[in-house]
Image: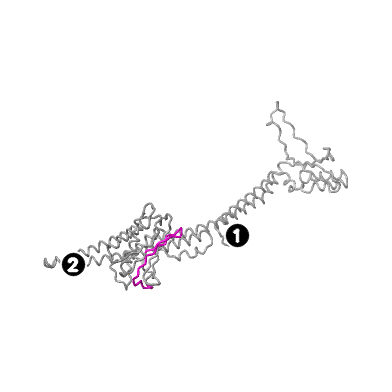
Amino acid sequence: MRLNRKTMRSLFWRILAAFWLALLLVAGLSILLGRALNQDTWVIARYPGLHDLAKQWTVLYENQGPAAAQQLLEQRRHDFDLSVQVLDETGQRLVDGTYLPRPPKRPEAGFNPQNLPRFPWRQLSQEYTSAQTDHTYLFIYRIPHGALEAWHRGSLLWPLSALGIALVVLTIFSLLLTLSITRPLNRLRRAVHDLGQTAYQQDSLALLARRGDELGVLARDFNRMGARLQRLISSQRQLLRDVSHELRSPLARLRIALALAERATPEQRANMWPRLEQECDRLEALIAEILALARLDADPGPASKIALLPMLERLREDAQLLAPEQHIQLRVPEDLALDGWPDMLERALDNLLRNALRFNPPGKPLEVEADSDGHLLHLRVRDHGPGADAAHLGQLGEPFYRAPNQDSPGHGLGLAIARRAVERHAGRLRLSNHPEGGFVASIEVPLTRPHV
């Protein structure tokens, strides 16, 4: 499998490679140490006086006779304290050899393996086949334990050095790997702290976001989340400012009316009561819409199956009670249904219908069409009014926003409630002008159960 450059920079592959390198180094050194400590062939190949003894002895024996071969063994006995015996293929000695005498047996009664004397040497064996005659010789070596242990201490210096170097390399790799993980995590921790203090700066993770591994992906996702939260915080602050502004106007009018009522005559007070009731009704309607917008962010509970045509027919009857001169035309399949929250969807559609009724001229139908493509519900509400200025289409649906060229008695929350309700159904609300005139509100909502 070919790995591209981005995959090779993945943090997963870095960690996997580091662990595999550690395993390979430890396994390799373990094998080397095992060979150094336990295998006879390794000792024979490296012990002084043994690594070329079989070849030299065979050449002397076959070319110069047993006397020259015996002299070589005695010379090695003198130089390296080696005891050697050589046997042929039948097990017969070919020369006298240089064996040391056996240690005396301890004069103890009875047989006990623990009482047997420990041989003062280590015995090794090696088969060697002559390249000249194809004869095979068996060499039996006896090395005194003291000399072998002293050689072991010196011969283990290079495996221990290799182990030390490997540990240093692994430490450096581990340190670099740890820093490559902890430093980005510390940056993310500081970014989380700044986000909690509402002091998050999106460019604080710009360098980390350019990485090609999982931490870079996490930084980019965190940047998007931070930007989204910053927009939500700004939106909430703007909403609070707008709410305070919208509430201040009817409250100010109520105070003025009350102040005038205190100085007015009884006949004048009677004329002011309808005005006071009107301001109270407007204030109550505004508070109700603000609460409705706030409830959309709460847990709506379990979803249920919604039959769309009966809901729209009820909304049409309610709308025509307020505007009997208007004609609402429904083109909706009878079997069209979706999973969702009926109260939330009904409020969204009711707001869209009421908004269209404000601008639709009498004598022209207000058109409501719905269909589906098997996955999405497509619903359109069209009026034949003047439409909206193209420069303000992008701001329609924001809380308390009203187009400057439209004189409407609302508070600018109807479309905002409709948009938020559609988004809670994992859908989308689009507002546009119809090519033939009028205004169109289009909804796309999944037919299946939405995830909140």
- Which residue is nearer to you in this view: 326 or 270? 326
Judged from the image, the secondary structure of the residue bearing numbered disc 2 is helix
Picture quarter containing residue 391?
bottom left
The disc, 2 or 1, on the residue closer to the chain's N-terminal end is 1
- Which residue is nearer to you in this view: 252 or 206? 252
Does residue 23 appear anywhere in the picture?
A: yes
Give the mark count. Answer: 2
Q: Which dot marks residue 257?
A: 2
Q: Determine the CA span between mark 2 and mark 1.
A: 77 Å
Compared with 164, 383 (above or below) is: below
Quick check: 63 left or right of 293?
right
From the image, tell me which residue sits under label 1.
3
* Residue at left offset 62%, top offset 59%: 2
Judged from the image, the secondary structure of the residue bearing numbered disc 1 is loop
Mark 2 crowd level (few <14, some 14–19, many ≥20, 10 Å Cα):
some
Q: Which dot marks residue 79?
A: none
Q: Which residues are magenta?
A: 368-391
